[in-house]
Image (tube, rainbow, N blue to C red):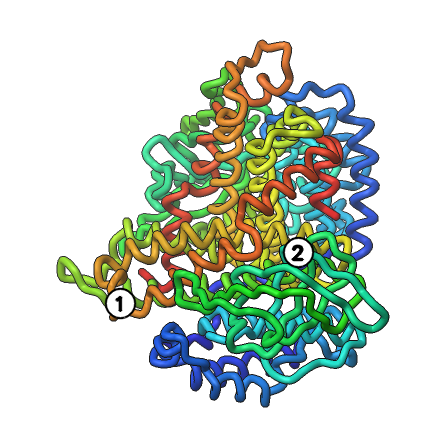
Amino acid sequence: MSETANLIHDAAHRLFAQHVTIDVLNAAEKGEWAEALWDAVEEAGFLDTLADADTPPVERSANTAVLLRAAGRHLVPIPLGETIVARAILAAGKVKVPLGPISFAVLDGHTHTHGDHAHLKGRALRVAYARHSANVLVSAQDSEEAVLIAIRRGKLSEGANVAGEPRDELVFGDTAGATVPGVSGGDLLAYGAAVRAALMAGALERILMQTVEYARTRVQFGKPIASFQAIQQQLAVLAGHTAAAGMAADAALADIEEGARRERSVAIAKVRTGEAAGAAASIAHQVHGAIGITKEHSLHFATRRLYSWRAEFGSESFWAEKLGRAACSAGADAYWPSVTQ
Amino acid sequence: MDLAQPLPFQFQLATLPPEAERLRGEVRAFLADELASLAPELKAQSWSGFNPDFSRKLGARGFIGLTWPKAYGGHERSALERYVVIEELLAAGAPVAAHWVADRQSGPLLLKFGTEEQRRRVLPGIAKGETYFSIGMSEPDTGSDLASVRTRATRSNDGWRVRGTKLWSSGAHRSHYMIALFRTGDGVDQRQMGLTQFLVDLKGPGIHVRPIADLTGHEHFNEVVFDDAPLPLDAVIGAEGQGWAQVTAELAYERSGPERFLSSMMLLKHLVAAAGASPSERIAIAIGRLTARLHALRQLSLSVATQLQRGANPALEAALVKDVGAVFEQDIPEIAHDLFGLETSLASDDPLKRVQAYLTQVAPSFSLRGGTREILRGIIARGLGLR
């Protein structure tokens, strides 16, 4: 890690440890906005890790990976990844970046541009933290422009994922917003998948740490259950999934600004972290026993988010089909050369 | 729980240097010529395919002993350049078994622990692709529990006498040497004490090599009987009684490479061919999932190679790669069966059926060789602080 990445790592963990307590997570799941957390994140300058034009792209994406991995470990209940990506897209498109949380979503509908302004019509489903955000960046699947629009201009219906994170529906009539040229719904989907993969990588690390700690302290048959081979072997499998998922998530963020490679790297990351999520949650709950499925125990904060995040911005099957079709249309002889590219 | 703590294992994205990518082009061009007529089911044997002619050509091109000093016939290239050569050989299904053990672990072991005379005697021949090695660790009563070896080397007037049996020594019937772990002391306090590594010339008297056919009928592993076999004094590698530490170092070379997830590559390639350019959704998803796993594994493995290049000892990371890699290699024949349900046969006209027939049968060995799944997961558990 670079020195900057190290600083971000330490600062992020300090900040999140202070502001993302179990009480804060519980309050967020009841619909409360984690205002103190958001203000601290904004003040720390974390929102522009990907937007900062003075930092080389390689370092920007590495810094963002470190930050989102830490956010995933702490399960931060704010649209951090969404805002970081939206601010980077807006800055690159020379659009004035508004204050506060910015969510983003793929629009089921259409957009068209008139001079400086774009109009859009349609709806966006399951938009993260829309009710707490002032603005949302949307683009239709095959659109050639994204539109930044004030959320109060649309009609909002509240919803949530199984982890209680806000996932709201937005409906826009013929509404005007600021245009960001060259950003399609497909691009937003890939950015969203990269963010979810990074958060899942962090949450997997949290689960591994928490389950190892539990196994070392829980005593049965007169000794810690960590001393049983049946437990050891399961935790080794959990470690393997955690390692592979983390590597894939890092690779996706490293390629996030590499147009041609981005979609493939994101697909790999979303498939691998999603596969790890199911296996890891299953092992963590098995090792924790009955206490792990109680509301009182904290394991579920991570496992419920993994169950949600693996389905958001394209599931494993969605992205795997893209990878598989690309491999098959390129043909068997091109298969290995493409792996090393 | 302090969430700021680092995990006990570290993997970081690695980038291959330009010289490694240049070398990749050379290796690919060489292999395209050399392997054009090799049958797919022989390519599927991967690092079990024994072909001395091929090994000699590889040596002549400078692709063996890549990282070793030039004084011993090596090429003084980086570990990452070696990584690229190895992954290209394995992905292409090159028959590398003849020189494989010598290049991967025997040579590096001798460079680390051997005497100057031992190095000068064998390393140049290995680098030329002419001198082959096998491993003498397991015995009839010693598998995962390596410290229980009983084959004993006893001092005689002019050297050593060896009695006992080594088992599963791949390629011993066609190798020139074996690096063997023998008991030379009693290890009263600790079983790991009193073990010594020896450089054994397999043509010597009192050594009987008997091939053992595997379940496909292929003969690659062997029983090697030492019937009061004499060895010279200077056959000892490193320090007498330090065999355990040395053999542990040797196993680290054995566990970290791309051979730990590429064993079924030939079948994956044939699956892509059989799927055609416009596969069904089900087949596309299955191939996509395998592709994602392959990419992640390669990045993990490259990270280990980078750590080795830096001189670190990523033993836990290597165990993780081998464990995750073996599951991947073993899933490929099962997924092939799930997708196509073919009645496979080594005698089929269809190359996919031959490749699948071979790999389905040998896949169980992928989580046995080089440390069983259970032993590796035990190593990982220790790394996690569970034992």
In percent of width and height, residue B369 lies at 47, 37
Disc ID at residue A115 = none
> In this picture, is B177 found above or below A69?
above
Q: What residue type is labelled 2?
A: Gly
A200 or B88, nearer to the observer: A200
Label 2 packing within 10 angstroms: few (<14), some (14-19), many (20+): some
Q: Does B163 sit left or right of B323 as displayed?
A: left
Instruction: Report the chain holding disc 1.
Output: A
Of the 4 image quadrants, the one containing the N terminus of chain B is bottom left
Q: Mark 2 points at which residue?
A: A109
Q: Nearer the viewer, residue A187 or A112?
A: A112
In this view, the mark in front (1 or 2): 2
Instruction: Give the class, few, some or many, for how many residues have Cα within 10 Å of label 1's Cα (few <14, many ≥20).
Output: few
The image shows residue B267 at horizontal and vertical percentages of: 60, 28
The residue tagged 1 is A295
Position in image of residue B204 (x %, y %) = 54, 28
Which image quadrant is residue B26 in? top right
- Per the model, the C-alpha gap separating discs 1 and 2 is 39 Å
Which residue occupies the extreme right position in the image? A115
Foreground pick, B135 / A174: A174
**Residue at (75, 48) in percent of width and height:** A341
Give the position of the C terminus of chain B as an image quadrant.
bottom left
